[in-house]
Amino acid sequence: MFILRVHSVDTELPLTDAEEIEFYTTTSLSNPNPKFRERRGVVHLYRKASQSSLPNPSSRSTSLFVVAVPKYLSAADFIRFAGSHIENITYILFIWNDGVEDRYSVLIELAAQSAADAFYFSLNGKRFSPAEAELCHILFTHSVEYTELGEIASTPPVGFTELPTCPICLERLDPDTSGILSTFCDHSFQCSCTSKWTYLSCTVCRFCQQQEENPVCSICGSGENLWICLICGFMGCGRYKEGHGVRHWKDTQHCYSLELISQQIWDYVGDGYVHRLTHSKVDGKPVEINSRCTSIEGTCHSCGYGDDSGINEAIYSSKVEAVFDEYSRLLATELEKQRQNYESLLAEAKGKRDSTIAEAVEKAVTSEMQDIQSKLDKCTEEKNALAEINRKLIKDQQVWHIKVKEIEEREASESRLMDEKILDLEEQVRDLKVYIEAQKTLTDMTDSDSIKGGTVLPVPSTQSSSTNTRRHKKAGRRRN
């Protein structure tokens, strides 16, 4: 079961070369012309994930979708390609895909289911031109939605997965997935059919045709185990490297990826390969897998698909090879994990050893620094104590220096006073001696008559005047 979502900001318009088509239909058919419309947009194709994409009574409808029509066929050429089936068509929409220069898509509505079945079996898998390689791939569609929001158009509905709209990429998938039965090539690297499309607008096909020498992952730059998304062309590494391909699927829901080395397509939702061709174990030639009868009602017992033991053997061999490859990769991954684990353990042990040595050195240095710091603090305290004592001594020295100076001054003053007192006493003693001698002399002279009638005159004397002066001073001091 297929549905379409078209990201388009335009509306349906009448076909530009409708006059030529109307002339062809009116001259060739007796029925009135169907509606011919065109529209620009980006087509997103979705399939029911839980069902086979091959046509069956429950999945058919009157709506058909032609996946890709080469650009060298005009709309009128496609009508001529449809031939007599045009008289059963009620509506045709030509969808010109933005950004795709080599093809366009066609949506067709038919009048009845029998007409849709006849159109499908008559034209599906037919070459558009005998001289060209492109095939007409037709799918039954159940609904078509138009939206102006690209995010809505690119988001798959619940239970659906998105398929590539490139016909070559669709042909790479197995029929159960793509719904395409007829193909003549496995579309491997450097195959000739991809060059038939003029512009190769599909990223995957362009890469296959013009393969880079050293492709790398778009995220990590790894060049090993690479996968390319069939929907958008994203190049990512597999789950056995960094897993960017798996992350891309989880982020975008693009579940189909092509492995570059084996050319096998992996379905992340179904967790298995869905590529169309595998190599036979008998002769090594490409063999189409999942081949089956093309009858809508089931096995017809006339085509031989159901009883082909060679194909069954190829399918079994391909499954065994896939399982072998899967377990080989799993073993390589586990060994790589073990290597990384042991390397991490060694790195951890080395880190612990280095950290232990660093801690011991740091502890020793810290202890030494603490000892030095304690000694420095002790010396600093002693220095501060000595400085305080020195300051006190200097202060005391200044105080005692003042006291000594005062004592010296006081002693000098007392010494001067003592000297003066001694001089004063000496003068007094001398005066007493003079007085006593004078008295004695007077006494002696009194007894004599020689001084009778005499007159006593003062005799000027420097010594006596100085003596008097000292006496006056002493008398003044005594009064004070």
Image (tube, grey):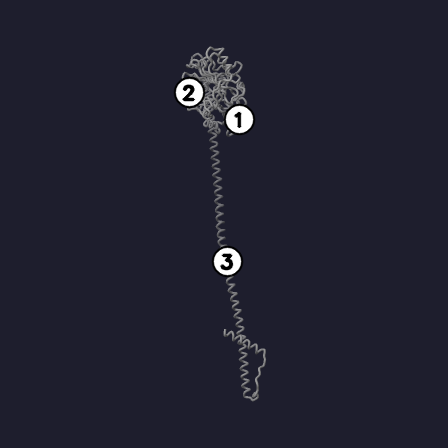
Is the C-beta separation of discs 1 and 2 under 8 Å? no
Q: Earlier in the sequence, mark 3 or mark 1?
A: 1
Location of residue 456 in the rendering, given as x and y in whole percent from the top left corner: 57, 84
Residue 391's disc is 3
Q: Is residue 55 above or below residue 365?
A: above
The three-letter amino acid code for the residue at tag 2 is Gln
Q: Earlier in the sequence, mark 3 or mark 2?
A: 2
Taking the spot 48% from the left edge, 32% from the top edge, the residue there is 340
Location of residue 286 in the rendering, given as x and y in whole percent from the top left corner: 50, 18
Location of residue 222 in the rendering, given as x and y in whole percent from the top left corner: 51, 29
Is the C-beta separation of discs 3 and 2 under 8 Å? no
Is the C-beta separation of discs 3 and 1 under 8 Å? no
Give the camera-side residue of 381 and 296: 296
Q: Visible in this render: residue 90?
A: yes
The three-letter amino acid code for the residue at tag 1 is Pro
Label 3: element kind: helix
Q: Is residue 223 above or below residue 83?
A: below
Label 2: element kind: loop
Residue 215's disc is 1
Q: Report, in whole angstroms, how far the alpha carbon at label 3 lies from the one at label 1.
A: 85 Å
Residue 427's disc is none
Q: Report, in whole angstroms, how far the alpha carbon at label 3 lies from the one at label 2.
A: 104 Å
Taking the spot 53% from the left edge, 14% from the top edge, the residue there is 131
Categorize mark 1 by other alpha carbons within 10 Å: few (<14), some (14-19), many (20+): some
Q: Report, in whole angstroms, how far the alpha carbon at label 1 lies from the one at label 2.
A: 35 Å
Location of residue 13 in the rendering, given as x and y in whole percent from the top left corner: 48, 19
Categorize mark 3 by other alpha carbons within 10 Å: few (<14), some (14-19), many (20+): few
Q: Residue furthest bottom?
A: 449
Residue wearing tag 2:
51
Categorize mark 2 by other alpha carbons within 10 Å: few (<14), some (14-19), many (20+): few
Q: Earlier in the sequence, mark 1 or mark 2?
A: 2
